[in-house]
Image (cartoon, rainbow, N blue to C red):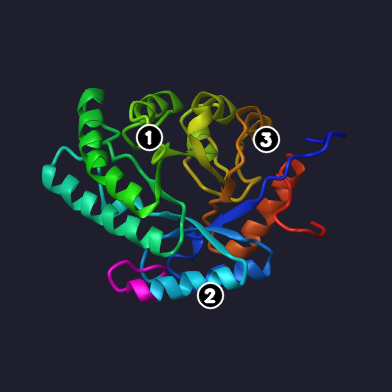
Amino acid sequence: MTTDSPRRTRPLGVNTYSYSWSAAAGDCVRRLGELGYREFELLLNPPHLALDEFAPDDRRRLAASLAAEGLVVRSLNVPSLDHNLASPMRRMRQYSVGLFVDAIDLASDLGATYLVVVPGRMSPLFPPPFEARDAWMRESLDALIPHAQKRGVTLVLENVPFAAFADAATLGAFVRCYETRSLAVCYDVANAHFIGESPADGLRALRELVRLVHLSDTTRHAWRHDEVGHGDVPFDEVPPALDEIGFDGTCMLEIISDEPEGAIQRSRRALHAFGFTEPFEGGI
């Protein structure tokens, strides 16, 4: 997409999912910083980023050293395989709440504004009634939101295909019931496209709730988080929708690749063609 009108500045950050098995969080953030990126979403996954083995003083030292280099940990993301805040089993919900309490503390210690939350895991074969998953998720969030408020962290629920609220309509209705700024939305355009939702329509529906945006590519036949150009997500529709809702947050490249640096850089160049401003000055 080309236009003669000035483009709004939209910084691109990087989610470190692709580095979860290969590099420590601090090391990969510094390397990506050399490429010009300044904002990051860290995947909470050892050995990339530990939880129990990462002392508060060490966390603050890492945050200070990154800040001195102009690098910002904007958000943390907890992989969804090890928890379920909307489980029908109370003991799993209790375990998951405890995990997220610790993740909130880690986010706060690293100076992160947001903690990305997958709202439960539902069986695609036979999911529970909507009312049940809503109640289970509320029980979990009622325990987490006060702690997030105390630590200055905003919980952002993500639209995930297998989660309790996979589409913009149900996710928005759930979050709006809380009427608190400590609970908002992380909108993933690939997840939306995969389930048949227009990412632009989803962004417009969620509007004031959107704090983070995840960018990657997929088709509607296979759920992926590929580099931009390897699927058929309509990225040209996303910047106008972001302009319409007045979004001024960070768009995170959440690319999953065995060769992440090249995939991230190629995605940045591809997104520039769709109207995204580059994350740093210089040619593409």
Query: Which badge, 1 or 3, comes first in the chain's sequence?
Result: 1
Q: Nearer the viewer, mark 1 or mark 3?
A: 1
SS category of the residue bearing label 3: helix
Does residue 198 appear to the left or right of 2 in the view shown?
left
Disc 1 marks which amino acid?
Answer: Thr
Q: Position of residue 24 (x, y in %)?
A: 46, 73
For the magenta stretch, what is the residue range?
A: 48-57
Disc 3 marks which amino acid?
Answer: Pro
Residue lying at 60% horizontally and 29% vertically, measured from the top left? 245
Which is more toward the observer, 169 or 258? Answer: 169
Q: Position of residue 232 (x, y in %)?
A: 61, 36
Query: Which badge, 2 or 3, comes first in the chain's sequence?
Result: 2
Which is more toward the observer, 67 or 281? Answer: 67
Give the residue at mark 1: 180
SS category of the residue bearing label 1: loop
Q: Which mark is residue 239?
A: 3
Q: CA distance from mark 1 to mark 3?
A: 27 Å
Residue lying at 29% horizontally and 40% vertically, measured from the top left? 120
